[in-house]
Amino acid sequence: MTTLRLGTRRSALATTQSGHVADALRAAGHEVELVEIVTEGDTNRASLASMGGTGVFATALRDAMRAGEVDLAVHSLKDLPTAPAPGLTVAAVPARVDPRDALCARDGLTLGELGEGALVGTGSPRRRAQLEALGLGLRFRDIRGNLGTRLAMVGPGDDELDAVVLAAAGLTRLGMLDRVTEVLDPIQMLPAPGQGALAVECRADDAAVLAALRPLDHADTHAAVTAERAILAELEAGCAAPIGALAEVVDDEDGPVISLRAVVAATDGSGDLRRSITGPLGEAEDLGRRLARTLVADGATALADLQATHPPTASEQIQ
């Protein structure tokens, strides 16, 4: 039996995610070897947007696949650019973990309890824009680092953060849900397209690996994230665009359908635009593109820079 070489970043979250996929493949009778790959996103402490956005985590893994050094790779789906990668394909999207954002605050505080002037850490323009739109009078600091590093920034000291906002999925996978003081309702904050889902990618012409990965695909999750990411593709959105989206498969009187919500928010908190659409699972990509066009028609481009590639406050200073 040929051993499948699974490329993974070295971070605790990446190796945990890759380990879940490896375990599923082993349970199906395959031999799997994890191969560590260092990406620019792991070694460069600059803001993601200034390095070129989410793709910095995927490029090295993709290069290793194309070079034949590894057979497959596992990505956080929200880290993948929407543009197709020549020679590669997303062969499976496993069942999604909680896609919502989570607040991790000092003293067990919730968002409403933080109070005006509280200092919140986030490197995401999407998160900041939606928090600004709530009108709570929060201050923000742009932060980077793995989950442990960001959580360690929260504390009672004058130079410490009152809270950070992180993906609930990562905290779930690393067993850190005890640090969550509030899971944020999508009514308040829509997540990043694809958040909570994994993408298992391989070479498009590798029939054996494609066959091995096919059983890992979760049809409802795949349809949902296809709809969400189609919004970004239609808008040709930049890596720092303040866009959130969440698709859910729900039962209608005629069977399961996709319910898709999206938001574009002004980074200064002056407003946000929320729209939704519902339609058949088989039209996931079309639904996302249609919703994107509705957002544009209703004023999204006047509200925010959808092609933004650098956040307006990409520094470590308190704003």
Image: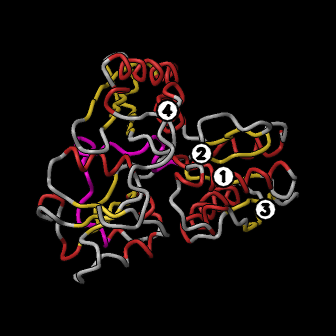
Which residue is labeled 2 in the image? 80
Sequence-first tag of 4 and 2:
2
The kind of secondary structure element at disc 4 is helix
Residue 224: image tag:
none
User: Residue 149: x percent and y percent?
Assistant: 44, 75
| Cβ atoms under marks 2 and 1 closer than 8 Å | yes
Circle 3 is placed at which residue position? 31
Dot 3 alpha-carbon crowd within 10 angstroms: few under 14, some 14 to 19, many 20 or more: some
Residue closer to the observer: 26 or 164: 164
Q: Which residues are magenta?
A: 178-197
Q: Is label 2 in a helix, a strand or a loop?
A: loop
Q: First in sequence: mark 3 or mark 4?
A: 3
Label 3 element class:
loop
Check contact, mark 4 vs mark 2: CB within 8 A: no
User: 280 or 256, which is in the foreground?
Assistant: 280
- Percent of width and height locating residue 259: 35, 27
Instruction: Estimate the spatial distance between the alpha carbons at disc 3 and disc 4, rounded to whole Å.
Output: 36 Å
Amino acid type of the residue that numbered disc 3 sits on in the rendered structure = Glu
Which residue was labeled with disc 1? 58
Name the residue tied to disc 4. Answer: 232
Which residue appears at 35% of the width and 76% of the height? 153
- Amino acid bearing label 4: Leu
Q: Earlier in the sequence, mark 2 or mark 1?
A: 1
Marks 3 and 1 sit apart, C-alpha to C-alpha, by: 24 Å
Q: CA distance from mark 4 to mark 1?
A: 17 Å
Label 2, label 3: how far apart the Cα atoms are: 26 Å
Main secondary structure found in the magenta portion: loop
